Structures are given as structure tokens and as C-alpha cells.
Amino acid sequence: MSDESTDPKHLDSGEGAPVPDKETDSAATRTDDDPRSSDAAQHTGGGRVVELAGADSEPVQIGERRGMFGATRGQDTSGYGGLVTPTLLPGASPRPYGGYYDEVADVLATALEEGAGFGAAVEKVVVDRGEMTVFVRREHLPSVARTLRDHPSLRFEMCMGVSGVHYPGEAGRELHAVYPLLSITHGSRRLRLEVTCPDADPHIPSVVEVWPGNDWHERETWDMFGIEFDGHPALTRILMPDDWPGHPQRKDYPLGGIPVEYKGGTVPPPDQRRAYS
């Protein structure tokens, strides 16, 4: 009586063969009983996978934080003055992204083929902490925004605003504008667009013609960060007085002090107070 597990005919037919290890199995050898194979096909539109050439998947270091609270002028009183933590931004994410993100990327790539193309318009795609961010080159922002709003398979009808971010350590792309999008048509799908520009040329095209609700949001981002949204119908300050100098939420903006007139003195800005040794 022969053992079926070692019967050569049984091995030739493939019956009873061990399932490859899922940690080392490749896409070429993956078996149909591996749920990842069906997930990948479902999430990439039946096999279409768009990869961005040159997108770096390594985290981007834009600075470092010293001590417990990031004090830079010797004011750290926490006892952790020797602690050095790098400030990292996530790099490009590999495919598949998971969930509906692959479908969105593939549909967007197909739709952009009629224009500049996905690779020219999109710098990288980052999926971090369960959220998808598409980094768009600023000159292509209007066409990408219109495609995301109008394409039947995308339909991101709502832009929830625009937020500014200032990274002084990211040379040549210090200012970021972030747009959270929402698709009601497709069951509250969410997507984030991010556009960068340098301090020396802080210009990004306005998307008010695509999402009119961004009117006041772009004014606020200009007011707080100094990003100029080209094509905005009335780009003026919305929080600060018209003659206010500078943009208060930039990291290079002076922190300021507090006048204490009844004592005849002032409380100096946090970065100018005395250190304790």
C-alpha cells in the first residue's frame, strides 16, 4: 500500500501538493486559494496596475527634533536635551494600495491619458494610516481636480476646504496645500490631494472654478501661510487685518509676547525666555 503523499503520480498531477508559504510566495506562483490573489484583481480593475516611475518609497526626512519639546535655543528643561528624533514624511506607497484606492488610481490614470498623463500630473501616491494622498504637480491641479469631480467612476463632488502646511526644512517645496475630497455618489469615499510650492514662488492654481466652496478656504490659507492661489476671484485676508505684516501660521513667524501693562512689563515670547540649567 503506497502513501499518496509520496506517490510520484500524485505529485505530477499536483493533487495534494503543499500550498506555498504565503510570506515567500510571489505573484507568479500564488495559488487561487490565496485570498490576496482575488483581492489584488478586484482592487486593480482586473489586473491593471499603474506604477509611477521614479517615485521614492523611502521616508523623506525634512528635519529633526531635539529634546522633549523641540526647543532650539537651549530652553529645554525636560531633562531630555540629548534626545534627537528625525522628522519624517512618508514616501510613495507600492501597489496594491488596498480597498477602493486602487480603483481610484486606475480610473484617474485612464482619464488623464487624454491630457498630460498620470505620470506627468501625479508626483506620487501615499497611503498612510489608512488614508490615500495623491501628490499633484501644481500646474496640473485644475485638470486633475476637474477629472476627480466629473468622471462618473470618481465623482468627488465635495472639496472640504484647503489647509496650508509649512515645512521649512523641505527645500524647494516648503509650502503644502492639502485638499480633502468626498464622493457622495460612491458611498462617502474619501481622497486627499496635496500640492507643494517653494517659498520663493508661493503660487498654486485656484480650484474655486471646480469647487466654489473653496473660496473662503483659499483666502484663509493665503492669510495664514502666504500661498497665492492664482485665479482666485478675490484673494484678500479673511482673519487678519488687511495691513497685517506676515502670515501667522508659518513656522518662521515670530511667536510674539504678552504685554502686562498693570505691572509695567511684558512676558517674552517662549523662544526668548530664560533657560534653566
Image: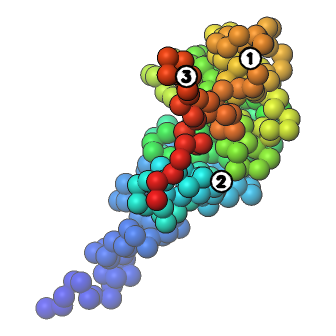
SS at badge 2:
strand
Residue 37 coordinates in the image, percent (x, y) = 44, 55
Residue 254: image location, x then y, percent: 67, 34
> Label 1 sits on what residue type?
Trp
Can you name the residue that lies furthest to the front here?
264
Q: Which residue is mark 3?
A: 264
Look at label 3 and name its amino acid. Gly
Please say if 169 is above or below 177.
below
Q: Which residue is mark 2?
A: 62
Circle 3 sits in a helix, a strand or a loop, which is it? loop
Numbered disc total: 3
Residue 244 - label: 1
Please give the name of the residue rendered at 46% of the width and 59% of the height, measured from the top-left corner.
Answer: 277
Q: Earlier in the sequence, mark 3 or mark 2?
A: 2
Location of the N terminus (image quadrant): bottom left
Residue furthest to the bottom in view is 1
